Image (cartoon, coloured by chain):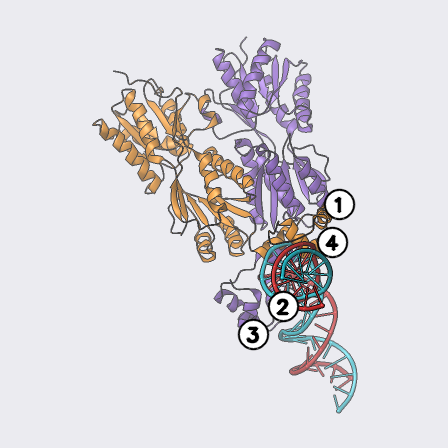
Chain colours: A purple, B orange, C red, D cyan
Amino acid sequence: MATLADIAKAAGVSSAVVSRVINKDPTLRVGKETRERVLEAITALDYSPNIAAKSLRSARSGLIGILLNDITNPVYTEILRGAQAAAVRNGKALLVFDSAMGEESAQRMATLIAGGALDGLIIQASGEVSDSVIARAAARKVPTVLLQADLELDAHMISLPDEDAARIATRHLIENGHRRIACIATAQGMRFTERRLHGWRSALAAVGLDEAGLIFAPSEIDGGEAALAQLTAQAPDATAIMCFNVLSAIGALRGLNRAGRRVPEDVSLIAIHDVPFADVLSTPLTTVAMPLHEMGSYALDVLSREQAVAGETVVDKAPKLVRRGSVAPASG
Amino acid sequence: MATLADIAKAAGVSSAVVSRVINKDPTLRVGKETRERVLEAITALDYSPNIAAKSLRSARSGLIGILLNDITNPVYTEILRGAQAAAVRNGKALLVFDSAMGEESAQRMATLIAGGALDGLIIQASGEVSDSVIARAAARKVPTVLLQADLELDAHMISLPDEDAARIATRHLIENGHRRIACIATAQGMRFTERRLHGWRSALAAVGLDEAGLIFAPSEIDGGEAALAQLTAQAPDATAIMCFNVLSAIGALRGLNRAGRRVPEDVSLIAIHDVPFADVLSTPLTTVAMPLHEMGSYALDVLSREQAVAGETVVDKAPKLVRRGSVAPASG
DNA sequence: TCCAGTTGGTAATACGATTTACCAAATCTT
DNA sequence: AAGATTTGGTAAATCGTATTACCAACTGGA
């Protein structure tokens, strides 16, 4: 493989010139024709700079690590897509980790962080984030952005318009005449959960309603189904359920189907987050789509700025109600 | 950050010893207590090796690039998961690219390859793979494995038991009494498609049946729905459809629903590839699950071996029929 | 006592790019 | 013509690790 020195020799200049031409050093004064000779040599020898050497010298790798809760969850892959798109724009590449993969995976990530291989970190993990990752990131002072995550880390926090989303969903149920509205929430205790609960409660309070029931469940299909069983016992009179996650909504839907209760005729269902297959479920699911793509994209943009990344941002694209078939006017 | 030299100074040895201790150089003869002093200094100073320097010196980065067709497609994320798991085992990390992200993304990948940043490459992309990526990979002789891909590249090819899967699916329909069996295929012209077609046809031929109809469609929900419309015209008498991709099956299901044809009462449906939400569709979908996780995992193992990677492998885990509700005995 | 072999290391260089400080030759100024 | 600038570059020192070649001191054997 051709190196800088090879190009220098071929063009009859020093390697300093070649480097400075490539990196467009504005302080470099060089003759028109010399520059052209350099450029020609580069294409002639098919030169491309060695990434490891660049990284070593410049102390930046162009690599961003992203830690997701679960790559197979369609809600989160949308974040990844957004981050990918922005990575390309900013000349970066993404190292993807999955917090569901266990401690060994976290150790790999920690090693990379400690070794200076990562210019930045994006963490989307409501639950488990290995201490080793956090400790390394803090020690190295790696610029970090947290997506809907509550972590003791000096980082930029990006959140979604959670309160709005919950309010939009709840209002939609209210506008359909529902009075007894229950909630299947996720991630108990986390800030984004509190924001959603607040949106739900304030929408109810605005029209003088009480909560009909509240259950916390993991953001998975099975979790939703289990939550539905509990909810049926806790709030048998609920005519509508709002779910904080589309997967738990799908679980609830399955539970309702199995219990012989029809959606939306007997119970209306609405979920936060949209997925491509929502319209092909046993009942097409009405959802409130969140700007997940934008969140991923924005995270990378924050990391690509030169300045410090501390601060807090809410993705400013509004949640969007996607009407399908799972919400119907309350009977009676 | 502490460097090798810092450790050496702290332990009162040369940095060569430290390096050789860390890397367990078997030719190093060192006193028990000296070794301990080194190890203590490492923990005391919280040393971890600089990845860029390691990469530069050793010409290996520990990074593997993986190019997927579409990260948001649940069929493919399963491959990613498998690769992740194996990456952790082998002390590697994954750089994820998406061929749906366009040429700019491919250029980033090509730059990384050309710059020697990638120790290996996994390509799962039935369709578009940028020439720049292929050219760079070939020029750099980066060890590459192709997943179900037909590419002019000196690489190891890993494929799935496609013929078996198609045969299992077809047989299942036959055993349910179907005589007119149509097929919605994907990726026309590719080898894995041919293998599946062969499985389908041989299963039919074994019991003296003809194909009832064949349409090619993209592996997406919309593609499946469009294909169904064509198929209805081409083979109105088909009582069962086998789909080469679960997403096109979902599209077909939607098309059937909209046309007022019931699944499985009027038409039976079976798909290759399983997804977690298959059982919560308007009709729970019977599928043939493929060893995708294993394919991803195996790909990484191949790249992690020291030897050359040329060759060809079929993932040896058998496809598994997952009976749900979309196949019923043929009426009549 | 002298030589061979072992023990326990070290010195020095290379990997490939970046960047600072410096400088010879050419041109301009007065 | 002498000094001041400008033009067009270069030399050399990093960045942090891996590795090869070498060697001093000690031990053992005869």
In the image, D5 versus B83, the foreground residue is: B83
Contact between labelled residues 2 and 4, with CB atoms less than 8 Å apart: no
Foreground mark, 3 or 1? 1
Estimate the spatial distance between the alpha carbons at disc 3 and disc 1, rounded to whole Å. 49 Å
- Chain of residue at mark 1: B
Residue B327, position as x, y percentages in the image: 35, 21
The residue where tag 2 is placed is A16
Quadrant assignment, res B196: top left
Q: What kind of residue is marked 4?
A: Asp
Q: Which mark is residue B44?
A: 1
Q: Is residue B288 above or below residue D15?
A: above
Q: Is residue B310 above or below residue B245?
A: below
Foreground mark, 3 or 4? 4
Disc 3 element = loop
Residues at discs 1 and 2 both on one chain: no
- Chain of residue at mark 4: B
Q: Residue at x 39, y 19 (%)?
A: B325
Disc 4 element = helix
Residue A141 visible to the viewer: no
Q: Residues within 10 Å of mark 4 (few under 14, many from 20)?
A: some
Q: Residues within 10 Å of mark 2 (few under 14, many from 20)?
A: few
The residue where tag 3 is placed is A12
Q: What kind of residue is marked 3?
A: Gly
The residue where tag 4 is placed is B6
Estimate the spatial distance between the alpha carbons at disc 3 and disc 2, rounded to whole Å. 12 Å
Q: Residue at x 60, y 68 (%)?
A: A15
